[in-house]
Image: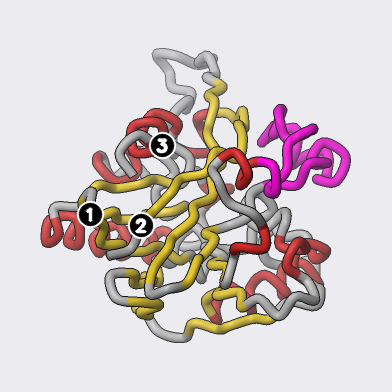
Amino acid sequence: MPDVTLVDRGRVRADAGYVLDGHTMASAAEPNPDHERLEFVVWSAVVEAGGRTYLWDTGPPPNAADYWPDPLYGAFEAYDADGRSLAADLATAGYDLGDVDAVVASHLHLDHAGELDAFAGTGTPVYVHEEELKYAFYSAKTGEGSVAYLADDFDGDLNWSVVRRHRHTLADGFELLHLPGHTPGVLGALVETDAGTLLVAGDEAYVEANLEDGVPLGPGLLWSEPAWRESRETLLELRRRHDADVLYGHDLDRFEELAERY
């Protein structure tokens, strides 16, 4: 059966309103609500399945403070990215970059694809959904789309392996899931392990309340609310069917809980 190792890639501070729609909305009763700035985790994962070693996401770059545009870094402060790297964090988890047979890019936002260049020119397959690849280049190369895509993250000599359907099996017990909403091409996964079934929600659900309470992401993080709601129903059904543990995109408490189990 597949084996999963979660890899801590650091922390990001951001206003809760980005992640939970309406979290600090003003009203007549409370015209000036206090804003709450929360700490979120950024993670990668190593999945060993079918005789291959897959890396899930690469996280932010070490130079995020200088590389990310000021408005984005100001909103999503990757305050401990400086001094850490994908190679170092993998080494802490017992792996080397050379161990990676393939990469899965859940999506190509700057906090998930910031070290894809580690695999440029290596021929290592990088799995990404077709809709994500299209939208990422469209966004990075024009004034349209989303500002969270930076061309230098993915416009290099990468060996793209394009996922075109809603479900794609990489190995026995390791299946990719298309979960549009946050972006057009977010990928999640269903992984059957000896420790149980892990349902990777990714950024379809940044935190538990997105899935459990049906609170959408804030408008700045939501490409399509109808698509997001449909993907949420997919996750709820898969969790029920497989009695799965759900790993959210940036929920620190859940990450720490599951890192001890998987």
**Residues rendered magenta in the picture:** 60-88
- Amino acid type assigned to the residue bearing label 3 in the image: Phe
Q: Nearer the viewer, residue 211 or 158?
A: 158
Colour style of the rendered protein structure = secondary structure
Task: Examine the structure image and report whether residue 37 is included in the region drawn in magenta.
Answer: no
Q: Is residue 147 visible?
A: no
Using a 10 Å C-alpha cutoff, classify the residue at mark 3 as few (fewer than 14 neighbours), some (14 to 19) or many (20 or more).
many
Residue at left 39%, top 68%? 49
Residue at label 1? Answer: 194
Residue linked to disc 3: 255
Dot 2: element: strand
Classed neighbour count for the residue bearing mark 1: other residues with Cα under 10 Å, few (<14), some (14–19), many (≥20): few
Q: Marks 2 and 3, how far apart in space?
A: 16 Å
What residue is shown with label 2?
3
Q: Quadrant of residue 153?
A: bottom right
In the shown orientation, is residue 175 left or right of residue 34?
left
| Vertical side of 36 occupied by 115: above or below | below
Estimate the spatial distance between the alpha carbons at disc 1 and disc 3, rounded to whole Å. Answer: 18 Å
